[in-house]
Image (tube, rainbow, N blue to C red):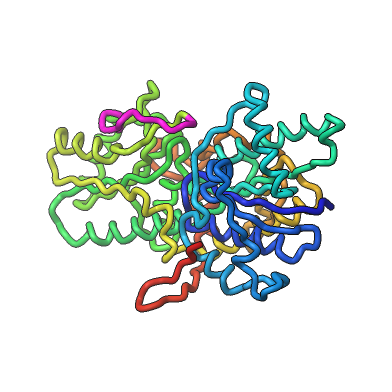
């Protein structure tokens, strides 16, 4: 065991469950003798480089000596949406090209006597863990630095469910629950009129269509689901889409369609590209929006019926009022497991979730090599998509369903849920 402090950060897009993972890491470290302090990076690695660090042990101590954790505050943190520590999207340079950057960063870690480093995030965050771990591995061969071991562990988070080497990702279950519920409400809203109309619901998902697939969960729960579901894993055809819409209108007047924001045609062009800014983040990801609106205008022009598009936008990420209890519990559990694994010697890894059984549903948390995860994308497998490419299979829905089950119990004050704020 290493004796020293632990540093925790959050990065990338917020979710309804990321703070549950933060609470889990804190809980797992709190009463461990070898962990002398627990610190949080404000706004991830970007904030840490500015020296913006807070004392998490002090924040979550139930007594003045800091010997016991405050379970109530940790529970409130677990049910708070977004990233309580703040986030960032900073891309670290390759260690071999800018070693001075890493020397500075490691020097700052050393000043705080940090021995354990946890980063909660998605693909790009795991890239940060991989680069830091790689740099420290090279440093460890130097005799002068052999006594400065630091263990780096990634904690998974992303609503997109696109991290590799894990059955699913914390944050996805709650987002899927919100989407499935919202789509059920939209279907019922649209059903009250007899005037032919098409409603297109745009759902997040750049490269992976897991979130959009969740719009179909009503099929095996209530018997109601969108007429069509289009994922980015299959090339999108405008002509086939229009044919689908016409067929649906022949069946009934109230057509509801779920589409991913990342739909592309066979040439790799985003369907909503004309409505997008073309701006990309530091990792090269284009900011997407406008797919639903583009298809709305197409239906209006070619079919001429009443049509509207609904973009669920950021409400998908942090709808904690309808969070999945399974998701929150697993997010906390994977954070706690990451803490135990790091203290036990793990480094250069991400804690993953392995599904051990489907009925009854059960999982376990296992560390996986970070190099197999960083910068890779796990897409919806072809067997989860129907032959026509306009819907998902029952197997896909049965895979998602356990992840949305269970409801959380918020503490409310004057009708609004109480959230944790540092």
Q: Magenta region, mostly helix, strand or loop?
A: loop
The answer to whether residue 138 shows anywhere in this view is: yes
Q: Observer-nearest residue: 59 or 385?
A: 59
Identify the residue at the far bottom of this view: 414
Q: Observer-nearest residue: 329 or 133?
A: 133
The quarter of the picture where residue 364 lies is bottom right
Q: Residue drawn 30% across and 31% down? A: 277
Q: Residue drawn 64% across and 55% down? A: 39
The answer to whether residue 393 shows anywhere in this view is: no
Q: How many marks?
A: 0
Instruction: State whether residue 153 is above or below residue 235.
Output: below
* Rendering coords of residue 291 (x, y %): 30, 37
Horizontal side, residue 43 vs residue 414: left or right: right
Residue 275 belongs to the span the image colors magenta: yes
Stretch in magenta: 272-283
Horizontal side, residue 10 vs residue 362: left or right: left
The quarter of the picture where residue 349 lies is top right
* Rendering coords of residue 377 (x, y %): 55, 35
Q: Residue drawn 38% across and 41% down? A: 260
* Rendering coords of residue 268 (x, y %): 39, 24
Horizontal side, residue 153 vs residue 249: left or right: right
Instruction: State whether residue 354 is above or below residue 385.
Output: below
* Rendering coords of residue 213 (x, y %): 43, 47
Q: Observer-nearest residue: 190 or 412?
A: 412
């Amino acid at each position: 065991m290493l004796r020293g402090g632990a540093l925790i950060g959050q990065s990338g897009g917020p979710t309804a469950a990321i703070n549950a993972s933060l609470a889990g890491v804190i809980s797992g470290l709190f009463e461990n003798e070898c962990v002398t302090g627990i610190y949080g990076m404000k706004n991830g690695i970007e904030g840490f480089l500015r020296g913006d660090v807070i004392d998490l042990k002090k924040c979550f101590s139930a007594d003045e000596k800091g010997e016991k954790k405050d379970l109530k505050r940790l529970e409130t943190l677990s049910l708070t949406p977004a990233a309580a520590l703040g986030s960032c999207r900073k891309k670290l340079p390759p260690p071999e090209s800018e070693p001075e950057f890493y020397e500075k960063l490691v020097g700052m870690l050393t000043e705080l006597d940090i021995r354990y480093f946890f980063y909660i995030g998605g693909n790009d965050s795991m890239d940060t863990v991989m680069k830091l771990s790689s740099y420290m591995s090279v440093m460890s061969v130097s005799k002068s630095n052999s006594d400065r071991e630091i263990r780096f562990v990634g904690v998974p988070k992303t609503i997109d469910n696109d991290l590799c080497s894990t059955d699913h990702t914390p944050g996805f279950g709650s987002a899927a629950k919100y989407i499935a519920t919202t789509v059920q409400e939209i279907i019922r809203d649209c059903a009250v009129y007899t005037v032919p109309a098409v409603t297109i619901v745009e759902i997040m998902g750049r490269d992976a269509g897991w979130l959009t697939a969740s719009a179909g969960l009503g099929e095996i729960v209530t018997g109601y689901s969108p007429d069509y579901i289009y994922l980015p894993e299959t090339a999108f055809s405008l002509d086939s889409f229009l044919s689908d819409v016409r067929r649906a209108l022949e069946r009934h007047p109230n057509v509801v369609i779920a589409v991913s924001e990342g739909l592309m045609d066979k040439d790799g062009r985003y369907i909503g590209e004309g409505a997008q800014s073309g701006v990309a983040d530091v990792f090269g990801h284009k900011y997407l929006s406008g797919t639903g609106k583009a298809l709305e205008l197409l239906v209006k022009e070619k079919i001429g019926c009443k049509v509207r598009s609904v973009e669920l936008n950021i409400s998908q990420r942090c709808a904690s009022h309808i969070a999945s209890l399974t998701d929150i519990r697993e997010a906390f559990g994977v954070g706690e497991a990451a803490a135990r694994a790091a203290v036990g010697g793990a480094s250069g890894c991400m804690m993953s979730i392995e599904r051990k059984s489907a009925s009854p549903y059960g999982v376990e948390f296992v560390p996986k090599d970070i190099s197999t995860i960083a910068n890779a994308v796990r897409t919806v497998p072809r067997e989860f998509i129907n032959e026509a490419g306009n819907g998902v299979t029952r197997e896909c829905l049965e895979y998602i369903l356990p992840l949305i089950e269970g409801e959380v119990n918020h503490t409310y004050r004057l009708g609004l849920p109480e959230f944790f704020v540092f």
